[in-house]
Amino acid sequence: MISAIVPLLALASIAPLPGAAGFSPPLPRTAHWPIPCTRTPPLTSIAFPQDGPLPGLPRPPNPIPALRAAVSSHRRRMAASRGWPASVYNEAMAWRAAAAVSLSALYAARGRTDTLIVRAWAWLQTGTSSLPRAFRHDHWEWGLATAAFFVFIHAYLLADRAVAAADRKGRVHPWKKYRLQDQNELVKRRRRTEHGGDGEVVVFDDAAFEGMPPVQQAKWHWKMWIFELPLYVLPLYIWDITIPRRAAKIASWSAPTTLKICSDVTCGLLLYDLGFFVCHYIFHRVPIFYRLFHKKHHTSTEVRAADQVRLSGVEEVVDVGISILALNYMGAHPMSRSLYNMVIVWMLCELHCGFVFPWSPQEVVPFGISNGSRGHHAHHRYNRYHYQKFFCTVDRLFGFVHRRRAKKEGGNNNVKLA
């Protein structure tokens, strides 16, 4: 009972006395809680101005037109820096968007992709058809790389021949504006004319090449199938037949995930590129190494896809060895190694192809971190700069990017590099 009285006394001690400020008489017994209050009119009944700003306030500016103008100006500036018309730059941006969507879709659907990879791996491990048996063979990796070289090198050969055939007929092939040697010759002609100049921005569209004589390309390196191919295949063939090992290793691997394959390929390319940068820089900085080991690769200043395999014996050992060490250090899965071989062969051929298509890695990869054929073409012209193959992060760190290309705005890279 005392416990029930104490709260009542405490409440009475803080309650206001009758007549004091804030005192309200007790509610009658007939009252209901809560007491209805005066209703305020709904917002819909309040009159607001329907059109125009509030009285006395200016209309806020519309940011959409200014944003569109800024984007359009940026696109024109970036297209001019590449020497491309706006339509080609828009096509390159479309390829970049497609690559971003594809990677995002691959990540979002990685669960289903992992299921398909498990089934494919089980088939490759135990299948009796031709492809699984070839996959388990010790010659699989270098055989796949050789086949990929054959396909990609001759694909760019067909592109060169298509442009040359159109030149003989007096027409401008749509791919001519993408070929770096033609761009270089066009810039030289503009500079020799009275209207040319170092500050001129040259746009590489089809009309710019009208009436320009065909360029004299370097001879196609057909001897690669006689010299470089046996030099690449024979050591690996002897190693495989001496120490057979691939089938046992494949049996011990479990199925990879999508992210595992992507990380193996990406990190393998990064490690290979870093190791190649060190060796490539040494070949250029030590004169005797350059004369004995690397000069053969720099036979032509205007490179073509077949020049990728124009290597000395030491260069082939170093190049292939760096790639194998990178994959072994990463502990790459056999499926990752197969995909890596196809990707790196294509990137090597694209690096020496002499074309810059809108879907080239240097245009699709953002932030200018991809070197691509334009940077490597400059390396062969000047015999310096761009010592990395696929990326230019380390080159930028040490100042080995061509000083003209390092400017991201306010210039035509192709004019400056010519």
Image (cartoon, grey):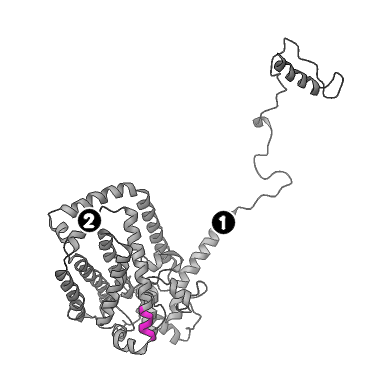
| Residue 202 visible to an observer of this rendering | no
Tell me the residue at 19%/75% (across/down). 235
Instruction: Specify the farthest residue to the front.
Output: 2
Residue 407 falls left or right of residue 312 = right
Q: Which residue is mark 1?
A: 65
Q: Check disc 2 and give the amino acid type.
A: Ser
Across and down, in percent, residue 242 comes to 15, 71
Tags 2 and 1 touching, CB below 8 Å: no
Across and down, in percent, residue 172 comes to 32, 74
Across and down, in percent, residue 46 comes to 69, 32
| Residue 21 visible to an observer of this rendering | yes
Q: Nearer the viewer, residue 261 or 217?
A: 261
Quadrant in the picture for residue 286: bottom left
Q: Quadrant of the C terminus?
A: bottom left
- Mark 1 lies on a secondary structure that is helix
Earlier residue among tags 2 and 1:
1
Span of residues in magenta: 279-285
Neighbourhood count class around disc 2 (C-alpha, 10 Å): few under 14, some 14–19, many 20 upward: few
Q: Which marked residue is nearer to the observer: mark 2 or mark 1?
A: 2
Residue 34 falls left or right of residue 408 = right
Q: Is residue 280 magenta?
A: yes
Q: Nearer the viewer, residue 366 or 60?
A: 366
Q: Check disc 1 and give the amino acid type.
A: Pro
Q: Which residue is mark 2?
A: 252
Q: CA distance from mark 2 to mark 1?
A: 61 Å
- Mark 2 lies on a secondary structure that is helix
